Image (cartoon, rainbow, N blue to C red):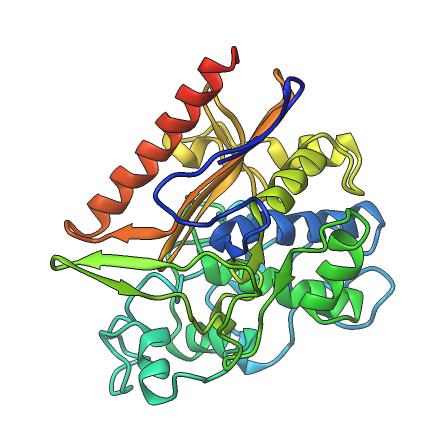
């Protein structure tokens, strides 16, 4: 756990061996805070408008935000706005966390009833996934969760589309844009982005990841992160990630405080996270604003409390799958309780 606070900066760990706040680990979906910040930086500069439809042309360009090709003809394409993608309210089917259903469009495909990412990696563990490929599966099989704006459903593939939008608007690769516009200016030199299927190692020094299942522990440190570009592919250190959370949510990362307030604003509809998820940021009542992340072997929280000016990053390097996803849910709940206990002891 890394803490940055007015009372001082602290790092504590247990059960992980020789781990410091300069050890690299996979931050998984906390990556979404960088993607959302990238989109909002472009919005702030007038290079895009988050209330535009994804079929509209970007300001000053004669190309739409997403390619006008069959590979992007997903259901309700003409009704989806960038804001909806940011808030997981576009209804974009999530390729990462859902098996491909059998319907009139997908019938006969070899990956039906399977997770597409797992299916492709079974064919080639080093396969490099692309935005076009992932969105193309939704288009080919006409998959969606609901009509845009009608509901909330977390979608990694929706954030893949935001990665595509960043590339088309900025003229840079997602990795180059995030590095040049957010990492370097904010001194996050121990944060990196992986996009090649064959690039499966973590930078040294690193924290090894493990899965506990069936009474056995398996190391899962090496991983093909290419399907998770823009939604879960970033590697960081506890110190870098805490600095990012503090700078971003204080309005000091290149985004104005007004822009950050837009990112923090939830919908106030529904219950749970659906009521508080803004633009790549959600609110944890009584704790603060941030995001969590889960990639095989790693669980992470990054949270900033504007009332106390305290940011913390807490993570573990083991997935407990003894009871499936319920075990992971229990782990995540325990992590927030531990963080809350530590902060209470500090007087926050």
- Residue 122 image offset from top left, x and y in percent: 31, 84
Is residue 20 visible from the viewing direction of this image? yes
Left or right: where 116 falls relative to 150: left
Image quadrant where residue 123 sits: bottom left
Image quadrant where residue 141 sits: bottom left
Q: Is residue 63 above or below residue 14?
A: below
- Residue 104 image offset from top left, x and y in percent: 28, 78
Residue 110 vs residue 202, the one in the foreground: 202
Q: Is residue 298 above or below residue 238?
A: below
Q: Is residue 5 above or below residue 61?
A: above
Is residue 50 visible from the viewing direction of this image? no
Left or right: where 105 falls relative to 263: left
Q: Is residue 335 above or below residue 16?
A: above
In the displayed orientation, state which residue is furthest to the front: 18
In the displayed orientation, state which residue is furthest to the top: 347
Left or right: where 243 falls relative to 225: right
- Residue 216 image offset from top left, x and y in percent: 16, 61
In the displayed orientation, state which residue is furthest to the right: 60
Image quadrant where residue 309 sits: top right
- Residue 60 image offset from top left, x and y in percent: 87, 63
Q: Residue at x 29, y 52 (%)?
A: 319
Residue 135 vs residue 236, the one in the foreground: 236
Q: Residue at x 74, y 36 (%)?
A: 259
Residue 78 vs residue 23, the one in the foreground: 23
């Amino acid at each position: 756990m890394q803490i940055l606070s007015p009372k001082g900066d602290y790092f504590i760990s247990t059960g992980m061996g020789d781990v410091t706040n300069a050890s690299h680990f996979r931050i998984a979906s906390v990556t979404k805070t960088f993607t959302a910040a990238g989109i909002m930086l472009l919005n702030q500069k007038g290079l895009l408008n988050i209330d535009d439809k994804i079929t509209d042309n970007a300001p000053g360009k004669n190309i739409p935000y997403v390619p006008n090709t069959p590979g992007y003809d997903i259901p309700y394409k003409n009704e989806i706005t960038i804001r909806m993608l940011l808030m997981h309210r576009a209804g974009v089917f999530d390729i990462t966390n859902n098996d491909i259903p059998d319907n009139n469009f997908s019938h006969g495909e070899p990956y039906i009833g399977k997770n597409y990412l797992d299916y492709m990696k079974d064919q080639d563990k080093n396969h490099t996934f692309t935005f076009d490929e992932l969105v193309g599966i939704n288009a080919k099989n006409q998959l969606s969760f609901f009509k845009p704006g009608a509901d909330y459903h977390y979608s990694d593939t929706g954030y893949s589309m935001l990665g595509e939008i960043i590339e088309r608007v900025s003229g840079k690769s997602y990795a180059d844009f995030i590095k040049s516009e957010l990492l370097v200016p904010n001194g996050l030199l121990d944060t990196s982005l992986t996009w090649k299927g064959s690039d499966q190692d973590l930078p040294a020094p690193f924290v090894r990841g493990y899965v506990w299942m069936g009474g056995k522990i398996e190391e899962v440190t090496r991983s093909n992160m290419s399907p998770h570009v823009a939604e879960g592919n970033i590697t960081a250190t506890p110190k870098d990630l805490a600095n990012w959370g503090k700078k971003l949510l204080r309005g000091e990362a290149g985004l104005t405080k007004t822009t950050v307030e837009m990112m923090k604003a939830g919908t106030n509809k529904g219950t749970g996270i659906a009521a508080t998820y803004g633009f790549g940021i959600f609110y944890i009542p009584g704790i603060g604003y941030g995001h969590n992340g889960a990639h095989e072997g790693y669980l992470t929280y990054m949270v900033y409390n504007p009332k106390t000016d305290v940011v913390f990053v807490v993570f573990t390097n083991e997935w407990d799958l003894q009871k499936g996803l319920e075990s992971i849910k229990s782990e995540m709940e325990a992590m927030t309780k531990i963080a809350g206990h530590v902060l209470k002891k500090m007087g926050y």
